[in-house]
Each structure stands twice: as structure tokens, then as C-alpha cells.
Image (tube, grey):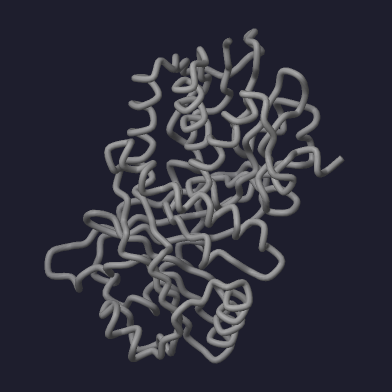
Amino acid sequence: MELVVAGGGVIGLTCAWRAAQAGWAVGLFDPDPESGSSWVAGGMLAPVTEAWPGEEELLELGLRSVALWPEFAAELGDPGLHTGGTVVAATGTGDRAELDSLADHLARLGRPVERLTGRELRRLEPALGPDVRGGLSVPADLSVDNRALLASLRTAAEKAGVRIEERAYRGEPADTLLICAGAHSAALHPALRGLVRPVKGEILRLAHRRGAFPMPGRTVRALVDGRPVYLVPRPNGLVVGATQSEQGFDTEPTVGGVRDLLRDAERIVPGIAEYGLVEVAAGLRPGSPDNLPLIGRLDDRTLVATGHSRNGILLAPLTAQLIVAVLDGGSVPAAVDPGRFG
């Protein structure tokens, strides 16, 4: 049986690899594989610190998927999986109240997190600055080097027999089509129109310079006067992100976005003022109406795996597991079935 995968980001590559392992003849089409939002992403694997009231189904999906990550990463040769955990920092009173609400919500769901004062957080993570007044420690929220991950996935997919065509999918015949084109997925099937939209996010990459204050050992997420910001460790630097706006398919970084990210990140980790600014980029997250992905069957010969919003890398192992199950005649949870929109 032949499967055509339209899209070569983290979801497309993972699904193609797993389908080939399951015995499918797989062709993947993408004019620029390993790019897009997967290339720009921060690489957080953070179901707990992404959790908010009303998104309980997304939390459960994320927890299922993050549990798959250690074995998934090991199978890929460990593409930069960072297990140091996550701290969440708050500055003012309003930020602390919002994190307290998150902690209360998680406790009600049986997922308690550790609440810390600003002083306790700085003992845990000395890179944090004096503006941090309190926060949370979440050791189970991890991160991965997204670019190393993409390279590892492509290698694994090709070794499993996936044929990667560096051109756009143009209706090539196959027994089954799997749409994994991220924010561009809606153009590939009428059932996806209005269900997948581009959500712009700008990120920065900073390089640690000799003599600068040491990098954080954990992912640092924060609220700064109500604005979210994150700093994710890399071998010799940090990824700082991310803005969020809906401006169609615009991927040009803005002065305002860079200014806001640097201002807020420096309040949390003041030492980054001495780092080098080596990259500014923007990507398009594939948003869905309810922030849950669309995974499953659209018609007799078409499957979809898109709409992962800010959780594509986190949900990649679980998404591929679900897609292989559908290819084998199984079903998916109602929460992600594209048919939930009617």
C-alpha cells in the first residue's frame, strides 16, 4: 500500500517514518522539508506549563505524548532532548495571581506543581533576576533541540524507506494521502477550509558569549506584566520566544516583536544583555478553532494531521501513533477527530 505525505515538518516527517516502519510505501512531498514553524520553534515539550482551564483535553493529549518522548528520542539517537525541567516565573502581583490560578487548576486535575518564592526560584535557577517575585517548578516539562530533531527525523525516515521529494504535492496518485502541511493545510482539502489558520510567532536566538553570565540550566517560562515569554536552553545559547499574532501568511519579523521579546526576557534573565543576537525569525503555527489538532480521516483516501498550534513538536510521537492506527483501520479520540466540526 502506498501513502503520500504532503508536508515535511516535524509532523509529516514523524508520520512518514512511522508509516514506513509499519510497512507502507511512503512518498513525502515538500518543496522545503525541515522548515516552517518546525524550524523556528522553541522546542518545548511542556504540557503542564501550557495548561489552562478549558483545555483539559489538550493537557491529557500532551501528557500522553510527553511520556513517549524519552523512548522516541532514544530511537532517533537522542536529538538534543533536555531533561532539566522547567521553571515558570512571575514578576508583578497580577502575574503571581495568574500562576497561582494555574497551580490551583492543575491541583484540581491531580497534577500538582511546586510553588516557590522568588528567592527559592533564584536558588534553583541562579540566572533569574531580582524582578522575579515567585513562580513554579515543573521538572516533568522538557525541551528538545528542534533543528537537531528535524535532521534526525529525516535521516530515520529515509533509512526506513521514505522517498522525500523536494517539491510541492500536486495531486500525485496514491492509495492514501496524509495532509501534514501545517498552516497551509487548508488549501489541500475543502473539508479543512476555515479549520486551519496561520498564527504568526517571532523568535530570537541568542549565543552565550565568553565572560557572560552562565545560561539557565532549565527552560524558563515567565509572565511579565501579563505577557508570556520563554527562554529555552541550547548547547551554546538560548531560544527566546514567542510573539503571537494573526496576520495571514506574513513571516517577516518586526521591530516591535524583537523589542518586546528582548525587554521581557531581560527582566527575567538579566544576563542575556551580554549575549549575542544571532537570529531573528518568524514562523506560522497552524491554529485550529479549539486549539486541538485535527488528526484522522477526512474521506476514504485522505487523512490529516495538522492544527497543532504551539504543540506540534510535543505531540509528534502521539500524532504518528494515532495516524498509524488509522492506517491500520483504527480510530482516534473524539477530541482530535476532524469530524467534530461537522
The quarter holding residue 238 reads bottom left
Q: Quadrant of the C terminus?
A: top right
- Report the side of 268 relative to 251 (left or right): left
Q: Give the residue at x 24% y 70%.
A: 274
> Looking at the image, which residue is at 18% across and 62% down?
209
As drawn, 203 above or below 128: above
Image location (x, y in percent) of residue 179 = 63, 28
Residue 21 position within the rendered picture, expressed as x and y whole percent measured from the top left? 44, 22
Confirm whether residue 263 shows in the render: no
Question: Is residue 255 visible from the viewing direction of this image?
Answer: yes
Q: Is residue 320 left or right of residue 118?
A: right
Horizontal arrangement in the rendering, residue 10 relative to residue 338 (left or right): left
Residue closest to the eye, 82 or 288: 82
What is the residue that sits farthest to the left in this orientation?
211
Q: Quadrant of the N terminus?
A: top right
Please name the residue shown 80% across and 31% down the image. 191
Q: Find residue 149 and report its image quarter.
A: top left
Q: Is residue 167 above or below residue 274?
A: above
**How many discs mark residues in the rendered view?**
0
Can you tell which quarter of the image residue 35 is in?
A: top left
The one nearer the camera, 190 or 140, is 140
Question: Please, which residue is most extreme toward the right here?
Answer: 342
Establish if 328 lies above or below 334. Answer: above
Relative image position of residue 34 (x, y in whole percent): 43, 33
Q: Position of residue 95 (x, y in %)?
A: 55, 83
Q: Is residue 257 left or right of residue 239?
A: right
